[in-house]
């Protein structure tokens, strides 16, 4: 079975398109930042990230 994975589009500090990845690995949620380890998120993107993290947490039994 494939582990759940979500990608959230964002930008880096230089305005380039990037993505933050949220995935579930066994009983843990893994947050993978874009290259350079910086992500610039809009208010809507932060709400989307919160929703993705909540869904991932539910899948590992955190909810």
Image: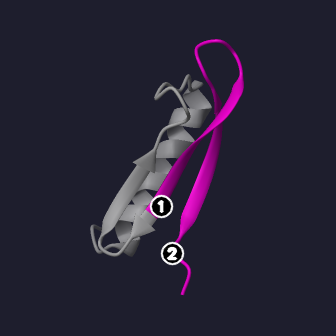
Q: Is residue 55 visible?
A: no
Quadrant (top left/top right/bottom left/bottom right) for the C terminus: bottom left
Q: Residue 47 in the image: x percent, y percent?
A: 52, 39
Q: Secondary structure at mark 1?
A: strand
Q: Give the farthest residue toward the top.
A: 14
Asked if residue 10 can be seen in this view, the reply is yes
Q: Badge 2: few (under 14), some or many (20 or more) residues near its Cα, within 10 Å? A: few
- The x, y position of residue 22, in whole percent, is 49, 54
User: Considering only order in the chain, which callout, 2 or 1, is on the residue closer to the N terminus?
Assistant: 2
Which of the 4 image quarters holds residue 18? Answer: top right
30 is within the stretch colored magenta: no
Quadrant housing the N terminus? bottom right
Element assignment for label 2:
loop
Q: Residue 54: x percent and y percent?
A: 41, 57
Residue shown at 59% from the left, 35% from the top: 45
Q: How is the image coloured?
A: one colour
Residue lying furthest front: 35
Vertical relation: 63 (above or below) 53? below
Residue matched to label 1 = 23
Q: Position of residue 43 (x, y in %)?
A: 56, 26
Q: Is residue 17 magenta?
A: yes
Magenta: main secondary structure? strand
Q: Nearer the viewer, residue 42 or 40?
A: 40
Do the CB atoms of the residues marked 1 and 2 lie less than 8 Å apart? Answer: yes
Give the number of the disc on residue 58: none
Tell me the magenta residue range.
1-23
- Identify the residue at horizontal 27%, vertical 67% (top origin): 62
Residue at 60 percent across and 25 percent down: it is 42
Q: Which residue is mark 2?
A: 3
Q: Residue furthest bottom?
A: 1
Q: How far apart in space, not on screen, are marks 1 and 2 (Cα)?
A: 7 Å
């Amino acid at each position: 079975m494939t582990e759940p994975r979500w990608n959230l589009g964002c930008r880096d500090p230089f305005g380039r398109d990037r993505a933050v990845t949220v995935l579930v690995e066994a009983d843990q949620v893994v947050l993978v930042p874009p290259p350079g380890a910086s992500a610039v998120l809009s208010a809507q993107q932060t709400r989307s990230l919160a929703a993705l993290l909540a869904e991932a947490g539910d899948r590992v039994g955190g909810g």
